[in-house]
Structures are given as C-alpha cells and as structure tokens.
Image: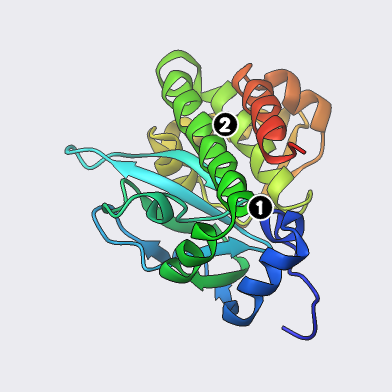
Amino acid sequence: MSGSSRPSNHLLQTLPAAEFELLRPHLATVELTKETVLFETGALISEVYLPHSGVVSMIVGFAEGETVEVAKIGRDSIVGTTAVFHDGPSLADAVVVVPGIASILATDRLHAVMQGSCTLRHLLIRHQQALSVQAQQAATCHASHTVESRLARWLLHARELCEGGPLPLTQESLAQLLGVRRNAISIVAHAFQEAGLIRYSRGNIEIIDLDGLQKAACECYAAVRTQCDRLLNAG
C-alpha cells in the first residue's frame, strides 16, 4: 500500500485519518479465492479481513449436515469483528463465495488500536451490530419465506456488494447458502430466467431486471438494507 491511499473498504474509508494511520503499516493485501475457508466454526480468529471486493459468507452447519448462510460481508464491512470484542471461538464458518481482494490485519493489532480509540471502538460496534441484524433477519427469513423470495433477496444483496457485476455461483453453492435442496434452486433459477429477471449460464448469474427481482424478494431485503445503512453510515 503506497502513501496514505486507502483501500476501497467502507470501514477503512470512514476511519478518521489518525486511526487509519495507526492501522496502515499493519495492513497487508490478500487474494480472496473462491471457496477458501478463512476460519471455521470453533476456531480462534487470529486475523480479520476487510474486503475491497468479493463476498464472504458466514455459514452455520447442522448435525444433519445441512448448512445455511446467516450473513454476508463484502466491501461494506469486516470479517472477524467478534474476535476483537470476545476471546471465544468463531460461531460460524467464514467462506469466500465470490472471489476478490481484501486487506488483512492481525486481530490483536486491531484490538490494541481500538483500546486507545473510542472512535474506532464505536465504529466496530456498529459493524458488529449490522452483522447481528443480518443474522437475526436470516433466521426469520429461513423459517417464514419461500425459496423464490429468499433467492431474490440473496441475489440482490450480493449484487450490491459486487457493484452490479456477474455472480460466479453454482446452483449447488446457492442451495448450501440458502439451506435448501439443489433441485429447489434449479426450479426457481429457471423460473427467474424464463421471467427475464436473470441470465444464468456456466455458473454465472447476471441480474437483468433489477425492479422485477426486487418485487420477487421478501421484505427482509429492504428491512436489512435500511437498518445496515443506518448503522454503517451513521455520522
């Protein structure tokens, strides 16, 4: 990282200059390779990730072998914040689902800087609260809404994090993230494509009717977006 330039991560972009300069010498840039597990459930989190691009999913598993995503993080936030406030292990797997680039920082270094900065502490708390908002809404959404509305919500959020670019996602990976069978995703994706909402080809999904997909999504999409915008863009 040259000079005082900042990576295109929202948290790093919104840090006051003094706090950023305390972190800058300790930031390294890493590639987020698709399907890489950054840390697993039960593991101690020694490093946090601040994506510039790509998407990292927080995934929980069940005894039956099923999985479901409880939150997703991209250039809007930080992966691993819980370790800064608590010494306990991770409560979810952090898995790269859309490849990208991230800044990486030792957890103890971030904690040390936070201890001397109320501004950084409050900022990290808001990012942790935004993650909790996603997790709480995901639980309600998983129990209450159809695969169609949940898939539409997922694609809309991922599109925001990827700035509208194509999403390199297979039906199998979407099924694991939504906690449903692959054939359910296949049926819904086909219906979306027939309706002209998306274009799906060779493991890539492109949203071509944003308004139509928003109408297909459940109210969770707007609810989470409103609350997270309030938290992450607070003055």
Q: Mark 2 points at which residue?
A: 151
Instruction: Give residue 52's position: percent from left, percent from top.
Output: 68, 64
**Where is 11 relative to 24, above or below?**
above
Cα distance between the residues tagged 2 and 1:
13 Å
Mark 2 / mark 1, whichever is N-terminal: 2
Q: How many labels does the image show?
A: 2
Instruction: Identify the residue shown where x is 38% and y is 34%.
Output: 179
The three-letter amino acid code for the residue at tag 2 is: Leu
Instruction: Identify the residue shown where x is 63% and y is 67%.
Output: 100
Instruction: Identify the residue shown where x is 78% and y is 51%.
Output: 163
From the viewer's perspective, tell me whether residue 133 is left or right of residue 87: right
The three-letter amino acid code for the residue at tag 1 is: Leu
**Mark 1 burial class by Cα count in 10 Å: few <14, some 14-19, many 20+:** many
Q: In which quarter of the image is residue 224?
A: top right
Q: Name the residue under label 1.
A: 167
- Secondary structure at badge 1 equals loop
Q: Quadrant of the N terminus?
A: bottom right
- State the residue lying farthest toward the front: 116
Instruction: Give residue 108's position: percent from left, percent from top.
Output: 41, 68
Instruction: Give residue 175's position: percent from left, percent from top.
Output: 44, 40
**Mark 2 burial class by Cα count in 10 Å: few <14, some 14-19, many 20+:** many
- Label of residue 77 in the image: none
Work out whether residue 100 can be spotted.
Answer: yes
**Where is 114 relative to 91, above or below?**
below
Instruction: Identify the residue shown where x is 64% and y is 50%.
Output: 119
